[in-house]
Amino acid sequence: MDEAVQKLIAQTAAGEVSLAQALAQAAALTGQVADIGCARIDHGRTARCGFPEFIYGAGKNADQLVRIVGHMAEKNGEAFVTRLDGAKIEVLKQAFPAGEADALAGTFALYTVPRGSRGEVAVLCAGTSDLSVAQEALNTLRFCGIGATLYSDVGVACIERVLVLGDQLRKADCCIVAAGMEGALPSVVGGLTPAPVIAVPTSVGYGAALGGFAALSGMLNSCASGVTVVNIDNGFGAACAAIRILNQK
Amino acid sequence: MDEAVQKLIAQTAAGEVSLAQALAQAAALTGQVADIGCARIDHGRTARCGFPEFIYGAGKNADQLVRIVGHMAEKNGEAFVTRLDGAKIEVLKQAFPAGEADALAGTFALYTVPRGSRGEVAVLCAGTSDLSVAQEALNTLRFCGIGATLYSDVGVACIERVLVLGDQLRKADCCIVAAGMEGALPSVVGGLTPAPVIAVPTSVGYGAALGGFAALSGMLNSCASGVTVVNIDNGFGAACAAIRILNQK
Amino acid sequence: MDEAVQKLIAQTAAGEVSLAQALAQAAALTGQVADIGCARIDHGRTARCGFPEFIYGAGKNADQLVRIVGHMAEKNGEAFVTRLDGAKIEVLKQAFPAGEADALAGTFALYTVPRGSRGEVAVLCAGTSDLSVAQEALNTLRFCGIGATLYSDVGVACIERVLVLGDQLRKADCCIVAAGMEGALPSVVGGLTPAPVIAVPTSVGYGAALGGFAALSGMLNSCASGVTVVNIDNGFGAACAAIRILNQK
Amino acid sequence: MDEAVQKLIAQTAAGEVSLAQALAQAAALTGQVADIGCARIDHGRTARCGFPEFIYGAGKNADQLVRIVGHMAEKNGEAFVTRLDGAKIEVLKQAFPAGEADALAGTFALYTVPRGSRGEVAVLCAGTSDLSVAQEALNTLRFCGIGATLYSDVGVACIERVLVLGDQLRKADCCIVAAGMEGALPSVVGGLTPAPVIAVPTSVGYGAALGGFAALSGMLNSCASGVTVVNIDNGFGAACAAIRILNQK
Amino acid sequence: MDEAVQKLIAQTAAGEVSLAQALAQAAALTGQVADIGCARIDHGRTARCGFPEFIYGAGKNADQLVRIVGHMAEKNGEAFVTRLDGAKIEVLKQAFPAGEADALAGTFALYTVPRGSRGEVAVLCAGTSDLSVAQEALNTLRFCGIGATLYSDVGVACIERVLVLGDQLRKADCCIVAAGMEGALPSVVGGLTPAPVIAVPTSVGYGAALGGFAALSGMLNSCASGVTVVNIDNGFGAACAAIRILNQK
Amino acid sequence: MDEAVQKLIAQTAAGEVSLAQALAQAAALTGQVADIGCARIDHGRTARCGFPEFIYGAGKNADQLVRIVGHMAEKNGEAFVTRLDGAKIEVLKQAFPAGEADALAGTFALYTVPRGSRGEVAVLCAGTSDLSVAQEALNTLRFCGIGATLYSDVGVACIERVLVLGDQLRKADCCIVAAGMEGALPSVVGGLTPAPVIAVPTSVGYGAALGGFAALSGMLNSCASGVTVVNIDNGFGAACAAIRILNQK
Amino acid sequence: MDEAVQKLIAQTAAGEVSLAQALAQAAALTGQVADIGCARIDHGRTARCGFPEFIYGAGKNADQLVRIVGHMAEKNGEAFVTRLDGAKIEVLKQAFPAGEADALAGTFALYTVPRGSRGEVAVLCAGTSDLSVAQEALNTLRFCGIGATLYSDVGVACIERVLVLGDQLRKADCCIVAAGMEGALPSVVGGLTPAPVIAVPTSVGYGAALGGFAALSGMLNSCASGVTVVNIDNGFGAACAAIRILNQK
Amino acid sequence: MDEAVQKLIAQTAAGEVSLAQALAQAAALTGQVADIGCARIDHGRTARCGFPEFIYGAGKNADQLVRIVGHMAEKNGEAFVTRLDGAKIEVLKQAFPAGEADALAGTFALYTVPRGSRGEVAVLCAGTSDLSVAQEALNTLRFCGIGATLYSDVGVACIERVLVLGDQLRKADCCIVAAGMEGALPSVVGGLTPAPVIAVPTSVGYGAALGGFAALSGMLNSCASGVTVVNIDNGFGAACAAIRILNQK
């Protein structure tokens, strides 16, 4: 047992620090959380959750992103950022030329170890307008080494387009279904497959589409039992849910 | 032409009475509005709109309903009331034993001339729970002499149930589609028929179904072009819209 | 029976493919859905619905639009796009000089066979500010060969403006009524005509107009029976509903 | 002037008491607020506002109401209570047999000096279902000695019903217009009269009527300029606004 | 009686036109509604409502505005436009150099007859941020020859600021009170004056201010009886309501 | 393979019947949908989705429920009903004495083959008030032969209560987490386990809890990646989602 | 210090158990959480938060409440329950005759050690209808030995009623201000005192009061800086916040 | 007593001015409210509330801000402005070079007397994206001479990050906790400390985060008793609430 720990035990025994504080100090010794000033990086997440900490790009400036990605690349050899606009993508590409940027999906992926391809996730989107959300899901899955196939523009106004995918839906480990407007596609998919169906409402539509709330509330009330839902436009979250499912296989 | 009418036209042309006043006086001259104290009955509605004034039962007490139905029966030989609870239905049945009451739909129909059966309206409902709304539509149509067929429990979670109705949907003059929860059925129907599709969101569901708003906003954003929508649980209004369509044939 | 079909039957008989999958593969042989990469074009829609697939321009980039319009023009000799901004219109005009663009309505129409003029739809708007929505309806109707007349700036604050249209409203096959703010116009129109009345709430107004929801909810509660409603600013959808009605004549 | 008042002015000018404190002390010196335990009665309201304090019955129990009405009757010889249910009305009638109770409107009026009839307020309601709200307004006006006439069931689905009232609307000192559902009536009335128009949305309707919010938001966006609005079902508040207007004549 | 009218009567007698249509044609002969293509100008409004038609600038382009203002200036010698942005104001100033533009309030006033100053309206605003709304009210009042005084930055967080205005509030013919955030000012004002109080919620604030809905719903529930409310930021509407009140004096 | 099937494939390939029609006919040929008058039972659901059709009890009357349960019991030897009130439970218990009713959860389970116990789902609820929702999930899982353990009253206000469950959460195949009020528990659980986390917002709370929407929107925005959400109080749906996940193992 | 604790610190420092697990084990070692079946009682709360765990009565049945209160009374000699209806209060009074029940506030307090009276909290309510909320706050404070005074019916429509309390507000350690309708009172109070002001919106009002949301959103936007807000009708929560403030003195 | 006061007393005694008006004039003599044209500065606020009037920069233009800051600097030697954008900050920096501007927080502080550091407020934010809100709180506290420490990026997805702060939270005089998305952090903090916890929902997040309403409603329903809430993104208001708490020490 090292000296710092012995001292901590002594202080606790002497009532100089509370037990709670002693445990907090003990945990800090293991270095799982790295404080880099603008952020506290959670290096224990892969162990706890089965996937690493990803970086939410929307609320951070370019400098912060470069520092965080740099820290992660150095420590883990990989980093994945979502919700990036064009300007931030440019800065990241200059700072990390080996990274893969996707402007449509707003993601940036950096890694050294080649990605594998485990399992099979079917990613559907109802219309061409939902593609950016579907692509965010695909990129997240691929960064984590999960196999994924995109089926786009298969909305229910032409029901044949989805019926024809019957076998693919039945064989998938998980289906991610992105749809805006009335968000009816996950209900139809849910009736065609035994696989988990993760519905992603998108903000496609106008007026009573309510920026995606029509689709969201529709999906939450799907008459196909066992459909689960993530936040509007949250392709990333749907992918993480799929990863949690594939963690179990 | 009587003198009062001539004078009215001349006064209108001279700007002595406004058009609004002139029309009001014309209506009064021709006796179109009957003031019976608790209500002003619009006897000109069939001429103007193609269907008579119906009676909204929700905000009126039993005495008022009896007086209004009595007045209409005497003048026109027919009356139709919606949104009735059990107690009001009982009072109406006692006052007008010849009337037809439907407790599920909350309607009361009184007539002497037998109803015909013109045209064909397909009335679908997604689940058994939507039946009262569909029945209100059916009763309204039948009171007005329109042919109508009910197809119940054909929700999209088992898509075969609606696909099998393809021919009936294509041949109908109009489709009325009632659905609660996510309200996806009108989108699928709209993709299968050239007929007008009138969507009726129902208040079936709970939580994020929002008392029918999830279905309502979904239907307003249907990816099947040309679907129109009426108020939540408004089977009566859907039937009136169908009558307007059949007025044109 | 051709060879592909025979093989499919044999595989099905042998249990190598499921019946559902066999049918999907059989349907694919008929080529009704054309997969052009960024979209799956539904060439069976005119047969099923009485009007062709239209293109929603809002969520697609200019390149995708050019490809889709090109594909449709080649296959069908016509294409119609809605929800276009100025930049996309410019690209389409350059790619298809024969097309008709309307910047106010945000539409683009391309066709070779001259359009006819069947039926008569009255398109009303309450104020000058609602014109773009009314124009989207007019353009859609005209592309489909439906006769249509615009009556603009006839809001109820000066009731004479709408009363004077009495005969035109009574003779129309269908009335499309666009209004923002309190959306009262469809109720007045509904009381003056036996024709179907399709109400289009517009996003005109501010504050409690709620981007069109005041008008939308007002129209859904119209005291004039049989008024149906489409999404906010959805002149296109109203036109498609009118086409469905005219399909029946 | 008494000494306490002189001292108060001097202290205020010297900054020893703030204006707020000074006014409070002045009110206390002149006995304007009476603390009766369960309530602090504002006897200065008639002087300040032109009408006395009225009693909101909804959140008080019968005992409290009896005490408050008793106190007011003793001090002022009059009291007016709104938002009463049947049970509370019974208690008040027993305690104050001279009072006038109206179960439909939920009001109770007690007075000794006969009421006059000054001015003329036109109170319209769109349907029979809006009558209780209109009656609350009528009772409040009459308690305050204001002349008022009721015109009921004049909704816009039969426009002649309101057009025929043109002269009465033009001659009124003020128009109170109660309507539920889409709440279109005040816009039509506002276009027909130079008088102040106070719109009262009612909770009549269902589904997208949203308990009166459809009417409320519609009225706030009335295309007839200068229409003002009070809370849903607030016939009382509309009457008070009319009294403020008649205060100015 | 002129020939057109005689012909109309004859046609009506012959059943060639309906009575309703005859009256509409008769009314058209009086020319109260002028159709100038992009708009139908209501020249009868002053006679009906006590103030002329004003022009809502938000949904019209500069060309339309110039045509409408030009038509009104020629016919009536005056025009008033609201909800103008800077660009439209510039175009109007160039087209009508005699007009008075106010960029803060977004209004443009054109007139030849000098404006009078009848009555006295007190216009209060809670904070400096509410000034543009208050100014829109002031400009509307002044265009219509109504006297008006502005009291700005008198919010309730420093209650002395409003208490000190007691006499001015009591003597005003009408008080217009603009406030954002929690919108408490009208309740305090309503307790200090017998005059009509018109509350204008403003969109000042953020987060739970909900773009003015916090203030709007607060004002609709004012504990000061008889406060009426107009739409968010609708200083113009409040002024029109004040004009209706002054019409009665 | 029988002749009807061969013909169907051929007709589909020839475009004589659409894919939609073909699938419907195939379903009819294989007897998957049973029309029992008040309902159309979907006997193909286990094959398609991995679990049988369950019965939503809320919108059906007791007679309908008895007929549906009877039909299912006869055909499949099992039936499961949700959303039952006490009265319906009594009727079902009398009709099917072998069934297991749970009044707290509102479920009724009937089966002959003993249930197995495959896998392990951890079902957590934040407070005692959330127990009925959690119990609905447990009953659904157990009816389907899935192992499940309940951990109740582990809300985050005493974080130790959930931390102590670390191992159980990590070892579960899936975690279902029911919480009302602010709905924070799934975020904490999501940070402690690699397993799929299905969040169930409950309607526990008052005021700004908005009947479960505070929890719902919070869960949709969980900072723990990969948490999915079902409808408010939808313990049944969460269990079905868990079954879909266990279907994949 | 006992051996288990030493080992725990060492394991934490070595990364063998996470901080979360370590704290949970520490809590278990010190017996802070008591699992009594239907609930897990948090006996560490007074040490951590400065007040004991209180019992939320709304979602628990009478049996559960008796068990929980019994456990707490035995362990700590005191228990406090909120949100009780009449029936549950009766059961608790029978089980614990020494307890103090308050039907208006819905609380039940049981204790053996007499309560002290530390500090001074001013509890204001705008109207008589807000009394139950204010009383819940008072009971909570008094159970915790905090001095508190009630000032009721001091709404801003008669501003003198609150101005007269100036000194009491300035001298209080904390002001709790309950108000419904527009919720303006906390803004006025906040401008008169340097003490913390905790605003409690109440559900008093109707229509646009939105069950307390008008008051809630108004209070969140108070123009008086530093006003904080609790949930609608949450007098209990306001009292707890006051206790936290008095914990600091 | 000076002459102005004597005259005022005489006029009041003579009935020439009302007592209320006399007091208002008397108060005006003390000069606590300074009318500088565009604003009425409240110089009495420090005496009444324990902190000076701060300047809300959002609704004022640069000229107004310079005048107000100039007036305050001259009178009090200090001024503090919030909600500034970059352009306004530049103008203020040029006008008052001694001021301290913070572009992230949007604040500007000007003072001559050095700030002290009394007490200790812990300011936590859940993610890097919440930093601007936390910084606004910090700047406000520091301007008022309150000690404050920032702990950023301590969201609950990695619970160790907040657990490790246990002692700091317990020792703080007050905790300000800013969080967006689901806003769970204040509940966890509230369970770890006896200090007042002021929750600040931030607008961080998208979709169902509803611009901060998910966090806001979550925090209002916190299961940790005694958490109070301020408006979305209102770091300033949280700091003022903390100052009110520290005023009491």
Image: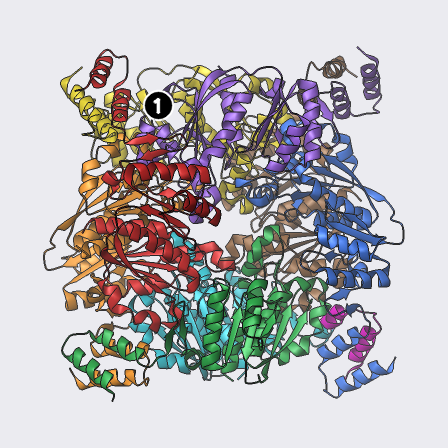
Chain colours: A red, B cyan, C green, D brown, E blue, F orange, G yellow, H purple
Q: Name which residue lies at 9% across and 56% down.
A: F114
- Secondary structure, magenta segment, majority class: helix
- Quadrant holding the N terminus of chain B: bottom right
Queried whether the magenta region covers residue B7, the answer comes back as yes
The amino acid beneath tag 1 is Cys
Depth check: E182 or F25 in front? F25
Q: Residues within 10 Å of mark 1 (few under 14, many from 20)?
A: many
| Count of all numbered marks drawn on residues in the image | 1
Residue B126 vs B246, above or below: the answer is above
Asked where in the image residue A80 lies, by quadrant, the reply is: top left
Q: Name which residue lies at 22% across and 79% down.
A: F29
**Residue A156 can be seen, yes or no:** yes
Residue B180, percent from left and from top = 39, 62
Q: Chain of mark 1?
A: G
Depth check: E139 or F116 in front? E139
Queried whether the magenta region covers residue F197, the answer comes back as no
Asked where in the image residue C83 lies, by quadrant, the reply is: bottom right
Magenta part of the protein: which range? B1-25
Tag 1, which secondary structure?
helix
Residue B96, percent from left and from top = 48, 72
Residue B198, percent from left and from top = 46, 71
Residue G240 vs C43, above or below: the answer is above
Q: Name which residue lies at 45% across and 44% down.
A: A91
Depth check: D139 or F241 in front? F241
**Residue C225 can be seen, yes or no:** no
Please give left or right for residue H193 compared with residue D178 in the image.
Answer: left
Please give left or right for residue G220 compared with residue E32 in the image.
Answer: left
Residue placed furthest toward the right: E113
Depth check: D201 or A7 in front? A7
Residue at image mark 1: G49
Residue C63 vs G62, above or below: the answer is below
